[in-house]
Amino acid sequence: MNISARNVLKGKVTKLTHGMVNTEVTVELSGGTEIVSVITKQSAEDLALTEGKEVNAIIKASNVMIAVE
């Protein structure tokens, strides 16, 4: 896989929550940190996502917002 995004995080799917249209995918990174992505249900099916599957989480954003209270 070649991709221009620089933020590619390897991890393992730990939870899938299917909705009518979207699927919430929880990925555990090395060290135990979890990140969550919401993708279409069709994409989850096309990728054959299952709990325990090794995946790459790719983050590509034009900006990152910071907030304080």
Image (cartoon, rainbow, N blue to C red):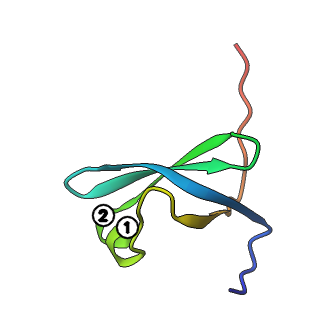
User: Residue sitting at 58 percent across and 57 percent down?
Assistant: 12
**How far across and how far down the image is residue 60, in percent?**
68, 63
Furthest toward the front, the residue is: 52
Q: Is residue 4 left or right of residue 38?
A: right
Farthest residue toward the left?
20
Residue sitting at x 70%, y 59%? 62
Q: Amino acid at mark 1?
A: Ala
Of 10 and 59, nearer the camera is 10
Task: Work out whether residue 66 or residue 56 is closer to the camera in this orientation and state it.
Answer: 56
Q: Which residue is at a point 72% across and 52% down the rendered structure image?
A: 63
Q: Which residue is mark 2?
A: 41
- The quarter in which the C terminus is drawn is top right
Is 40 positioned to the left or the right of 5 in the image? Answer: left
Q: Secondary structure at mark 1?
A: helix
Residue at 70% across, 62% down? 10
Residue 44 tag number: 1
CB-based contact (under 8 Å), mark 2 and mark 1: yes
Q: Residue furthest right?
A: 6
State the residue in front, 59 or 10: 10
Question: Percent position (x, y) of residue 50?
Answer: 41, 62
Give the amino acid at mark 2.
Lys
Q: Position of residue 54 (x, y in %)?
A: 58, 65
- Mark 2 vs mark 1, CA separation in Å: 5 Å
Q: Is residue 66 left or right of residue 28?
A: right
